[in-house]
Amino acid sequence: MVKIREIKCAGLRGATPEGGWSNELQPDDCVHTLIAVHTDEGSIGLGSVFTNDHLVRAALKILEPLYRDENALEPERVSEKLHQHTFWLGRGGSITHAISGIDIALWDLLGQATGQPIGRLLGGRYRDRVRPYASILMDQPEPLADRLREIKEQGFNAFKIGWGPFGKHGHTLDEAIVYAAREAVGNDALLMVDAGASDAFWPQNYKWALRTADMLSDYNVTWFEEPLVPDALEDYKELRRRSPVPIAGGEVLTRRQAFQPWLQGGAFDVVQPDVTKVGGISEERRIAWMAKENGVRFIPHGWNTAIGLAADLQLASAFPDTDLVEHLNGSPFIDEIVAEPWQLDADGMLAIPEAPGLGLQLNPEAVAKYTGEEELLD
């Protein structure tokens, strides 16, 4: 048995991208934390958590008696053990987030031990490459259009614009933003719009969302993401029934139990669980199959790190309808901390690694630069 010897974590700082939030992120804020599961045989599995490192460290202290000396090659059982024994501390919060990173790392270790990519361990690979959509913040029309043209030159042919001024300064500006984006990317590109209604004190409601959905249909928008506050389940159901464009959401939900009423109730056309929050790969695969059974498209939420993107790629390989992954454009936490930078092919696609586990190697110098903790991988 390969045993868990130690779990280390390190927060990423110094280049944290803007989130478009009303209380804006600063470069030295920490919202992403790397996880490294070390085994008694010397192997290391990598994970990522969409949570501040202080919270992850506190969670690891609580979880340590449960994971120490556990079998590192049984990710689903070990993760479920961690969930089951900590429910009384709050389902879905920082502990669940930390378990997400541990679970990803355990799947990485299982892949290394078996010599297989995670997608194959999940049941098989439906694809060996997938289309990334460049995810950027909205801006005033002209600078937004300039930025989109730059990204298009890099080879992307799918784009999501989100947050920023959208929904906060009137319908005229909202439409001007979408018009400028469509003109910049062209009629053949995929264009998604994210209202970012999980921002604090979101000012809009169902009627705004329905009117905006009607406008977005004029610009052939692929989906309308987070158009309503996160807990407005009944409004989401009604909006999905009446909207001429698909409705997407779910990035703030955690664990499969929280997704069940949304998927069974018909609240989404596209569901977007975040593997670094929901409970890891073990939990996200269950959510993905639940989505499939309820006629909902599964596209991972990837406002993330290189490790989170690697996990999303493996998940995309294992589900027949998951033909897109989110790519947080321009983040050093994705582009710089890897040993081999991500490369689009001539069709604007990303190859899904066939190497064991996540198929990812980190750049230790870059990790040390953004964490200040070289011992993460030692």
Image (cartoon, rainbow, N blue to C red):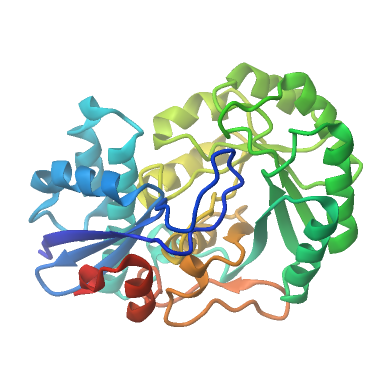
In this picture, residue 211 sits left or right of residue 115: right
In this picture, residue 6 sits left or right of residue 355: left
Q: Nearer the viewer, residue 315 or 48?
A: 48
Give above or below for 158 relative to 50. Answer: below
The reply to whether residue 11 is visible in this rendering is yes
Q: Position of residue 346 (x, y in %)?
A: 72, 81
Is the N terminus in the top left, top right, bottom left or bottom right quadrant?
bottom left
Q: Nearer the viewer, residue 143 or 136?
A: 143
The reply to whether residue 186 is visible in this rendering is no
Give above or below for 49 relative to 330. Answer: above
Residue at 48% in and 58% down:
27
Q: Nearer the viewer, residue 83 or 129?
A: 83
How many numbered badges does the structure rendering display?
0
Choose top left, top right, bottom left or bottom right for residue 21.
top right
Choose top left, top right, bottom left or bottom right for residue 240.
top right
Residue at 32% in and 78% down:
364
Q: Position of residue 108 (x, y in %)?
A: 32, 65
Residue at 43% in and 64% down:
14
Q: Nearer the viewer, residue 294 or 250?
A: 250
In this picture, residue 262 sits left or right of residue 305: right
Q: Position of residue 245 (x, y in %)?
A: 79, 37
Is the C terminus in the top left, top right, bottom left or bottom right quadrant?
bottom left
Q: Residue reaching furthest top?
A: 234
In this picture, residue 25 sits left or right of residue 86: right
Q: Position of residue 150 (x, y in %)?
A: 76, 71
